[in-house]
Amino acid sequence: MSKKDSVALVWCDNGMVDGKFMQGVADVMLKSGVEFSTTLRSQGNQIARQRQTVIDYWYDKTDYEWLLWVDSDVVIGPEKFKLLWDNKDAKERPMITGIYFTTDNPEEPLMVPMPTAFTFVNDGEGGFGLTRVHPLPENKLIKIDAAGMGFILIPQYRDWERLNHLHQMDRCLWRWDEELNL
């Protein structure tokens, strides 16, 4: 397999995963028609540290060109993964994410599922905030400013100078102008 086609499937968990999650992962790896190079997993209870550990390992110790990140509470399937894979483009779309849902009010008795796709909005005081992209267009790639990490395909960059040129640093946050959503 050429480096261009190499992909690692990654997740973090607290020591155990749900059967539906693992069935989705297995189905993607066996039925999507894409050959996966490896899986990477980080076990623990501090998700930010786990994610950084995996990203550092992937970047510093592997040459897999693509990383498919799936949160262990998100169920995926081969068809949804293929939508990401078939629309990937490291230069035109540096990150591509699939839609999954969370809620703004997890303590409410009737939670409303909302997409994890966001745009930046001016807060009126020189800063910015996030607003959800809702409602979503049906079956269409759209440009967004931010997304969750639950279902995202990321290329491995080795040319950070070029990446800095493509993407302006905005108040210490990366703004991925080309980030797309399915």
Image (cartoon, rainbow, N blue to C red):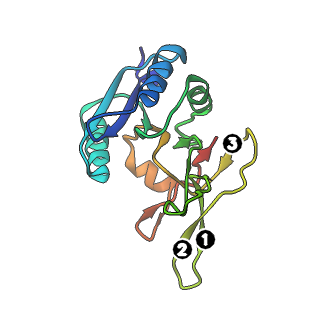
Q: Quadrant of residue 114?
A: bottom right
For the residue pair 156 and 159, the one nearer the viewer reads as 156
Horizontally, residue 47 falls left or right of residue 150, namely left
Q: Position of residue 139 (x, y in %)?
A: 73, 38
Horizontally, residue 97 falls left or right of residue 59, namely right
Q: Are marks 1 and 2 in contact (CB under 8 Å)?
A: yes
Which of the two discs, 3 and 2, labels the residue nearer the N terminus?
2
Q: Which residue is mark 1?
A: 121
Q: Position of residue 174 (x, y in %)?
A: 46, 59
- Quadrant containing the N terminus is top left
Determine the residue positioned at 40% across, 51% down.
161
Q: Position of residue 118 (x, y in %)?
A: 59, 58
For the residue pair 112 and 150, the one nearer the viewer reads as 112
Q: Is residue 94 above or below residue 102?
A: above
Which of the two discs, 3 and 1, labels the residue nearer the N terminus?
1
Q: Which mark is residue 141?
A: 3
Horizontally, residue 56 falls left or right of residue 106, namely left
Amino acid type at mark 2: Phe
Which residue reaches farthest front? 109
Between the residue at mark 3 and the residue at mark 2, the CA separation in whole angstroms equals 24 Å
Amino acid type at mark 1: Val
Between the residue at mark 1 and the residue at mark 2, the CA separation in whole angstroms equals 5 Å
Element carrying mark 1: strand
Element carrying mark 2: strand
